[in-house]
Amino acid sequence: MKIYFSGSESSGKTTLARYTAKKYKLDFLPETARTVLAEQELDINNMRADIDMADKYQQLVFDRQIKEEQKLTSFVADRSLIDVVAYSLQYSTIGHSLYFSDELTTYIKALRNDKAIVFFVRPSKSTLHNDGVRETVCWEKAVSIDATMKTLFSLINIEYYQIHTDSAQERTQIINQVLSKLL
């Protein structure tokens, strides 16, 4: 079983992914973007002003997401490759090439598999907070990424379960209802 939590920054994906991994005793795959940021000693806010750095970073995150997922047969992921493509379309010049890559085509086939579940966590002003990576959190950016992701899911025909409530109790209830039927 592969469970993905997709969505914009500060939507609560990490909290939900950790909860799900613990409850269902699955490996947790952290957000690869944060790992790459730390390894490359990059500042995300400065990178947005340097397109070459942004392109390199998005490619590294794309490649790392694939590599980390291939290590496990069953996991809960704090993001998917679709997230990486959405951010690449917004913040770099390589989004188009990532979207049309053979790697994404293969990935999409795997997401359509019965053993893959995608939860699309929608942004909420109540969950929007500084996560220690970004200097500022911007509602407009979160909504923009959310719209890009929704468009990508539609274009590539990926089914997902939407989490659109502010309540932590209701969020976990949605996850448990879905997984109790599928696991």
Image (cartoon, grey):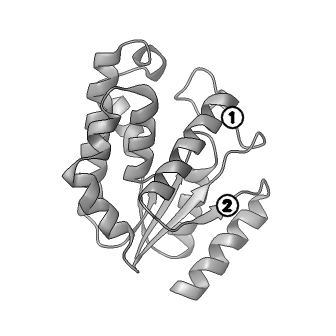
Vertical order, 163 against 147 (above or below): below
Residue 88 point in image, percent of width and height: 39, 34
Nearer the observer: mark 1 or 2; the answer is 2
Q: Amino acid at mark 1?
A: His
Residue 128 point in image, percent of width and height: 70, 37
Which residue is located at x 28 percent, y 17 percent? 52
Which residue is located at x 31 percent, y 39 percent? 61
163 relative position to 34: left or right: right
Vertical order, 89 against 6 (above or below): above
159 relative position to 66: left or right: right
Which residue is located at x 45 percent, y 41 percent? 86
Q: Which residue is mark 1?
A: 129
Can you tell which mark lies on residue 163? 2
Quarter holding the N terminus is bottom left
Q: Rate crowding at label 1 as few (under 14), some (14 to 19) or many (20 or more) other CA atoms within 10 Å.
A: some
66 relative position to 42: left or right: left
Q: 72 or 95: which is nearer to us?
A: 95
Residue found at the very far front of the displayed protein:
155
Which residue is located at x 49 percent, y 56 percent? 153
